[in-house]
Amino acid sequence: DIQMTQSPSSLSASVGDRVTITCQASQDISNYLNWYQQKPGKAPKLLIYDASNLETGVPSRFSGSGSGTDFTFTISSLQPEDIATYYCQQYDNLPPTLTFGGGTKVEIK
Amino acid sequence: QVTLKESGPVLVKPTETLTLTCTVSGFSLSNARMGVSWIRQPPGKALEWLAHIFSNDEKSYSTSLKSRLTISKDTSKSQVVLTMTNMDPVDTATYYCARISSGYDLRFDYWGQGTLVTVSS
């Protein structure tokens, strides 16, 4: 099974800061990588799909990049409403399986 | 409006079998490229994918839990059912169902609210 290593596990930043989260796959996954935001007590929400595509309705301060084994998720200017835990998720087609990263909790400094 | 809603017991005893139902609306389980997954999250921990069923009835399971899981669907009732056998306290978690509308591009665009299942004697 493909393992996803997400870092850091938590971070604290100020409003307006640029925030970066990384996810590393244990093998080449092309661009089969999605990012989710989960606020406390809520279900996750899809933000970025296929490494760099912004889901409809998601603010443009969220972005993603990468391919192969190394991926980056960025919040260009952290807002108070961005306080949440963020997860990467890889998928494979043959067979169709998927794995989540361990999550990154983002807090306001 | 697309919605998914999980239902099932809130408390199960160790060794029992858990049966969860996901009732969907706003789309059909028979539509091409549609599918539903079950995902769980132990309190304070990360998400863990469990199983998936596609519109053509193809199924896939987490390697680590495959022996304990069965997923099925009833298209006429708009329901997806997950059974997990031999429940243990470590299986205590919020269980979510989520929709995939992109075929084998496994990304979840809609989620249920989740249902907390506690395993305890």
Image (cartoon, rainbow, N blue to C red):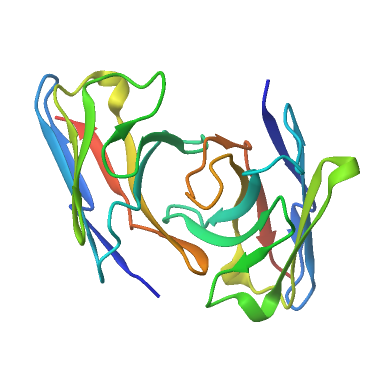
Q: Toward which corner of the image does residue A58 lie, by quadrant? A: top left
**B101 versus A92 height, above or below:** above
Instruction: Determine whether, in the image, residue A102 is placed left or right of residue B68.
Output: left
Q: Nearer the viewer, residue B94 or B14?
A: B94
Q: Toward which corner of the image does residue B26 lie, by quadrant? A: top right
Residue at horizontal 33%, vertical 69%?
A3
Which residue in the rendered view is the most extreme toward the right? B76
Instruction: Determine whether, in the image, residue A73 is placed left or right of residue B64.
Output: left
Q: Which quadrant is home to the C terminus of chain B?
A: bottom right
Q: Nearer the viewer, residue B24 or A95?
A: A95
Q: Toward which corner of the image does residue A84 lie, by quadrant? A: top left
**B39 versus A4 height, above or below:** above
Residue at horizontal 31%, vertical 34%?
A53
**B95 versus B2 height, above or below:** below
Residue at horizontal 47%, vertical 45%?
B107
Q: Nearer the viewer, residue B50 or B101?
A: B101
Which residue in the rendered view is the most extreme toward the front? B32
Residue A99 picture location, percent across and down: 42, 61
Q: Nearer the viewer, residue B32 or B51?
A: B32
Residue B73 picture location, percent across and down: 80, 54
**B115 versus A83 height, above or below:** below
Residue A87 picture location, percent across and down: 35, 47
Q: Which quadrant is home to the N terminus of chain B?
A: top right
Q: How many marks?
A: 0
Residue A10 picture location, percent across and down: 22, 47
